[in-house]
Each structure stands twice: as C-alpha cells, then as structure tokens.
Image (cartoon, rainbow, N blue to C red):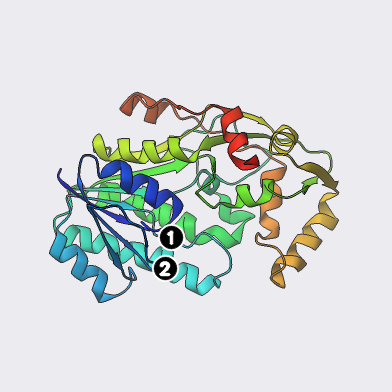
Amino acid sequence: MEKVLVTGVAGGLGRLVARRLSDRYAVTGVDTSRWKSSPRGIDTHVVDLRKRKFEDVVRTTRPDAVVHMGFVRHFRASDRERHSVNVGGTRLLLDHCVKYGVRHLVVLSSGYVYGAFPENPYQMDEETPLSASRNYPEIRDLVEVDSLVSTNIWRRPELRTSVIRPVSTLGPRVPSMVREYLRQRRVPTVLGFDPMIPFIHENDLAEAMTLAVDHQLQGVFNVVGPGEVPLHTAIEETGGTAWPIPDPPARWLFGRLFRFGMLPYPAGLLDFLKYPVSLDGSRFAEATGFRCKYGLPEIFASIRE
C-alpha cells in the first residue's frame, strides 16, 4: 500500500497516527476542524464525512487504506447528531471504500462497547457480545458502528476490515472521558466498589493503529496496555482523592447534572466504576507483535503533568 486516508486527523489521536503513518505512506487527512500546524507531507481537508465533498476527496486521492477515527465521542452533541455522524458517516464511508477500490479499512472502536456488568468474565475476548446499550444507552451509536463494521468483514470480503477495541486511553494529547474523570480533584466513586481498570498510553494506541495498517489486518482485535489497577489506585496515582457516593444518590445526581449540561458524562458511566471491563489482547499481539512501550507509572504521570 502507498496511500492512506485518515479521518478525524485533527484530533489528538488522529495527529499521532497520521505522523507515524507519514513515515511510510502518503497520508491524506480529513476532519471537520482544521489541523493548523499539520506537518509537511500530510495533505489535510476540512470536510464532513456525510457530505459530497468527502466523497470527492476519496475519489481524487484513491487511497489504498483508510483509518477511520472521525467520530463524535463527547456528549455535547445531541443523540441525533451523534448517530448521524457516527453511524450515518460510517455507512457512507463503507460505500465509498467499495466504490473507489480501497483495499483496507481500520476502524477505531472502544472496549466500552462490551458494557460493564457483574457477570463479565475476566479478560473478555473478541467473541464476547456487545452489550453496552443495555445500561449505557448514550453510547448505543458507537455499539452500532462497531456492529456495522464487524458485519462488513464478511459482507464485503474484498475490503479487508479491522476493528480495533482499545482499553481506557490516557495521555496529554487525546481527550477522553476517563482522562477528564481522573483529572478532578475530588473524584466520585460508587461506595463499596473498586473495580480493576486497564489503561493504555495514547502513544501505544497510535502505534497499534499504525501496526493494523502495516499488517493489513482483517477481523476484530482488542488492544490492551501494560496492565490494570484498582480504581482507587488510579485516582491516587493521578493526584485525585476518591469521593465515595452510594449508588442510588450518585445515579440520580449524575443524571440530573448531565441533563442540565453540568457534567460531561451520563449516569451510565457509573457501571464502569462498579464492574471491571478486562480485555484479552492476545489476538492482536500475536498478529502484529505489538508490545507496549509505556508502563502504568508513565501513563499516570502524563495525567499529573
């Protein structure tokens, strides 16, 4: 492969991935925001995946591979907007890939799509059902995207497709709910619960996305970091103080604050503060030789700094 198209290139992870890929490929990036200081050699376009202009970019560049990270993951947008961008935009992207001869597609999903439940097995593999919508309806669009692309693997075998499901990602450049959660001085927890939480550094995840392109992977792959720690340890290591709250009042409080725009995450997040979501990343490691370069102390230090 010679040419790679990256969606969501102006985001923190998009920039990290595009820089790595540009060492070996001709990279084109698209996003709804401008990457003002994009490096020389990376051609960028400000476009919406749902518009004709994006199809024009695919048609003219004719990429060999596409790395799809152009999602709305925050909750400032409405449910309708999130669904339109995430599901509708991905559906159009799949059509464009087939229409214009893209050979390989890499899609960034999330380990959150499995859902947090007391019956979760330790180290869930890629065959575990995606159940997050049961108690976290606000991310049903991301679950639908994952299911849509996973189905595409056998529906359109001419397009090699890989779905990457990473554990919680931390770092100074990539915004995420878990980063905003841990950066609080008083960090709310659910009284009586202290689940094991796995983490990966943003640079290691960017390397994993790059390896998925290099190896032209096909299938679904969990990507895990150097390990996991109890939630209270993660809070202490990132400089916060745990604030235990009983579940019913916490769920009511989170719901009210989220509804009025005073909290960036909904009440469904509470289940991830109660039950572990531990993933088995052996399939990806065996396929690519992936090994993390950043340990847990470095991951937590990146948040403190």
Asked if the residues shown at circle 1 and circle 2 are in contact, with their CB atoms under 8 angstroms apart, the answer is yes
Q: Residues within 10 Å of mark 2 (few under 14, many from 20)?
A: some
The span from disc 1 to disc 2 (Cα, nearest Å) is 7 Å
Q: Residue at x 37, y 56 (%)?
A: 148
Q: Quadrant of the N terminus?
A: top left
Q: Secondary structure at mark 2?
A: helix
Q: Is residue 195 left or right of residue 176?
A: right
Residue 85, numbered circle: 2
**Residue 42: x percent and y percent?**
25, 54
Q: Would you say residue 126 is visible in this rendering?
A: no
Q: Which mark, residue 71?
A: 1
Q: Residue at x 86, y 49 (%)?
A: 246
What percent of the width, then of the height, locates residue 303?
Answer: 62, 42
Q: Please tell me whether mark 1 sits on a helix, a strand or a loop.
A: loop
Which mark, by number, is residue 129? Answer: none
Q: Disc 2 marks which amino acid?
A: Val
